[in-house]
Image (tube, coloured by chain):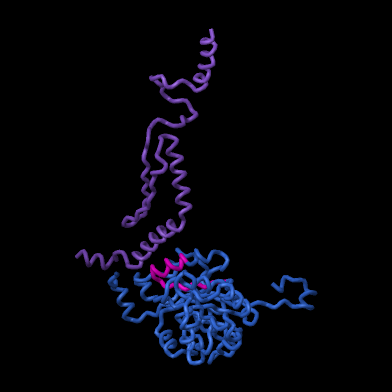
Amino acid sequence: MIDWVKKIFGGPTSSSTAKERLRLVLMTDHLALAPDIIENMKRDLIDVISRYVEVDRDKVEVNFEREDRALAMLANIPIVSVNRPNPPPEPPRVPPTLSGPPPRRRRRKKPQTQNPATAH
Amino acid sequence: MAMHQPLAQEVTAPAPKLGRAIVVTSGKGGVGKTTTTANLGTALAQRGAKVALVDADVGLRNLDIVLGLESRVKYHVLDVLEDKVSLDEALVPDKHSETLVLLAAAQAREKDEVDTEKMRALMQRLREHYDYVLIDCPAGIELGFKNAIVGADEAIVVCTPEVSAVRDVDRVVGLLGNRFKPQLIINRLRPQLVKKGKMLSVEDVNAILRLPLLGVIADEPEIIITTNKGEPLALRHDSETANAYHAIAARIAGEDVAAPAPELKESLIDKLGSFFGGKRA
């Protein structure tokens, strides 16, 4: 019965299978033929993620995998620390409870103020 | 070029009008490059144009066979490139078309023996004497391909409605770049199979390749038969497929004719079959 229904309405034809395979294989081919594009994309991807967490740039892996009917980009990006290496310019929404390291300017000024003290 | 020059200059010293050098290529082997080259060369010559066919498939000479000239070939392209014989001595006049000549490939030599720069210069010389220089490119994208395209300024890509052929044409078009203004011939189409959903259609192929379509050639037994005999089908005017070659030649020559597309010839049994919902696979 199912076979009969399939015959009437028609399942996927071999030409549509060919079309689908062609579409996928060409996507993969074009990616493989454009290593500079992949490198640029990888760099931009790392830049964006690095705004939020510190990542190990040298160990980032970007791969493309073909699944049955689609092409997927798989990125493996090792995170070194979640302390933001460069805090974004906008102020944090929650005031920090722990006192962080003092601003750099103060640190530099300290030895300058200490020097005259030791001289006395 | 000459048309854009000032008239006075044209009258005193007419610049030699160069013919067009067109490479026929595909990437994949066995899609019908040589048959297409022979038939288009014949069709262009039938229009009165002076045509030189160059077999660039060094090591695997075949164009002479398709044209039926294998017994007349004495010298080949490498003999000319190496100054062993003159170009005139190496050119084989066609049996059937007065304005057609063949420059055969070397059979017992290898592709890496061809000097790329000399090949470029030779194509330039041919362009000075012929309206069309059609270069039959070997399969592949290596040195043989590079030597075949070096002297060309246009490209015709031949593609069959198969995944592998389309993929290879896509690659070749990428390698050619824009300089060659590649145009497409879809070869060996079987309209019946397309209708049944068993073969990629012209639209399917060109949705991917997106090239100007010169025309479509059907997969017809008469092409095999004429190739067997060494008498290109384009010598005739009494068959749909022969006329498709003539229409493509007219389009190459710049005539505003429609791109030939094979029509579906349905038998009564086919019609009954599709009426009852033929099995799809």
At 50% from the left and 88% from the top, the residue drawn is: B236
**Residue numbers of the magenta segment:** B154-171
**Residue at the image point whose x is 52% and y is 66% from the top:** B176
Q: Is residue A30 above or below residue B184?
A: above
Q: Position of residue B124 (x, y in %)?
A: 62, 76
Residue farthest to the left?
A1
Q: Quick check: B258 left or right of B14? A: left
Task: Single out the residue that lies furthest toward the front.
Answer: A119
Query: Which quadrant is home to the N terminus of chain B?
Result: bottom right
* Image point (39%, 80%), residue name: B265
Drawn side of residue A108 relative to residue B12, left or right: left
Query: Residue B116 in the image: x percent, y percent?
Result: 56, 73
Hue used for the chain lettered A: purple
Which chain is drawn using blue? B
Asked whether residue B113 appears in the rendered view, the answer is yes
The residue at the far top in this view is A120
Q: Is residue A50 above or below residue B148?
A: above
- Residue B253 is situated, as x and y percent measured from the top left of the image, at 59, 77
The quadrant where residue B132 appears? bottom right
